[in-house]
Structures are given as structure tokens and as C-alpha cells.
Amino acid sequence: MSLLPVMMTVILVLLDQGTKWQALRALKPIGNMTVLPGVMDFTFVENRGVAFGMFAGKRWLILLLTVVIAAGLVYYYRKLPRTRAYQWVRAALILILSGAIGNIIDRVFRGYVVDFFEVTFIQWPVFNVADIYVVVGVALLIFLILFVIKEEPAQKQQKDE
């Protein structure tokens, strides 16, 4: 893996951890702060599960699964063709990996993930910057797989034989 994706991942993880540090420092003591009334609040939550609080209390299982997924992302990233056509796939994988690492850091050092963004105009779980990375990365990857990445005719013909 070249230095650029490593640097991008480090920068994204540092941004995530910086926002969580701010939430711990300024938001945890007060619990909640309205940002845009009826739209967005900052609400401090210690998330001990994964998405929507699933697997709460299963810290070691979550850590193990996240490490396996992160290793798979790195493996797949390394196997991607080094062509311009796959630059957006690589960007999506970096986003997902950065989000996974950001939340792994929380689970290892705090025992929970710091969540603090709360959308108040709909019923939605509180989330953080790492979660945004994962959601945007997965959405981008799905879009690319469904609508952009096309199999080369020679590869398709070989599979049909």
C-alpha cells in the first residue's frame, strides 16, 4: 500500500478522534446541546453496541468482527487494479476503513463508542464522524458496483465458458 492511502486514513481517523475528544470534553458534562432547533442536537451517548445498539455488551465480539472486516478491506484494497477507473472504489474503502478504525480505538480505550450527532426531525440513532465515513463509503461502493463498474467483455466471456 502506498503512503497516500495510509496518510488519508490517518487524517480521517484523527478528525474523528478529535471530534470525539471535543464531545467528551465539552458535551459529556452537559449531556445535550441544541444546534439547530428541531433539526440537530449534540447529545452525548456511550454506545456499547454497533449500529442501532445491536450487540450491546458484546465488546470482544464487536472488536473481533471489526478487525476481520478491516483486514478484509485492506486486502481488497491491495488487490484492486491500480487504474484510474478504481480510484473511487479505493476512496470508498478508505472511508469505511477509517470509520472502522475510529470506532475500534474507542472500543479498545474507552469500552464504548462516543456518539454525539442527533438528528431530531426523525427518529434516528445518535452517531459520530466515523459512522458517517462508513455510511458514505458503503453508499459510494454500492453505487459504484451497481452503476459504474462494468465487467470487461473479455472477462465476461471467460466466465461464460
Image (tube, grey):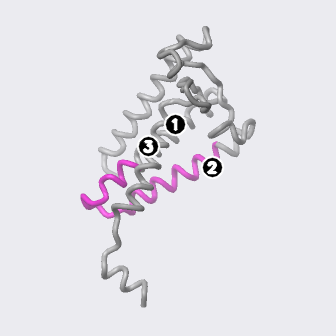
Give me the residue at 44% from left, 59% from top.
Answer: 76
Q: Main secondary structure of the magenta part?
A: helix
Identify which residue is drawn at 58% across, 26% down: 114
Q: Residues within 10 Å of mark 3 (few under 14, many from 20)?
A: some
Q: Which mark is residue 65?
A: 2
Residue 84 locus on image (x, y percent): 24, 58
Measured Cα–Cα span from mark 3 to mark 1: 9 Å
Q: Nearer the viewer, mark 3 or mark 2?
A: 3
Where does the image place residue 73, in percent across and percent down from the top left?
Answer: 47, 53
Q: Quadrant of the C terminus?
A: bottom left
**What label sits on residue 131 in the rendered view?**
1
Image: magenta residue range: 63-92
Instruction: In the rendered structure, find residue 54 and report the number of the disc placed on it.
Output: none
Is 84 on the left-hand or right-hand side of 9? Answer: left
Residue visible at 55% across and 52% down in the picture: 69
Tell me the mark number nearer the camera, choosing from 1 and 2: 1
Instruction: Kindly report the distance in space between the C-alpha atoms of the residues bearing marks 3 and 2.
Output: 20 Å
Which secondary structure, mark 1? helix
Residue 136 is tagged as 3
What's the amino acid at mark 2? Leu
Q: Residue 58, located in which quarter of the rendered image? A: top right
Residue 30 located left or right of residue 99: right
Q: Is residue 120 above or below residue 137?
A: above
Q: Amino acid at mark 3?
A: Val
What amino acid is labelled 1 in the image?
Asp
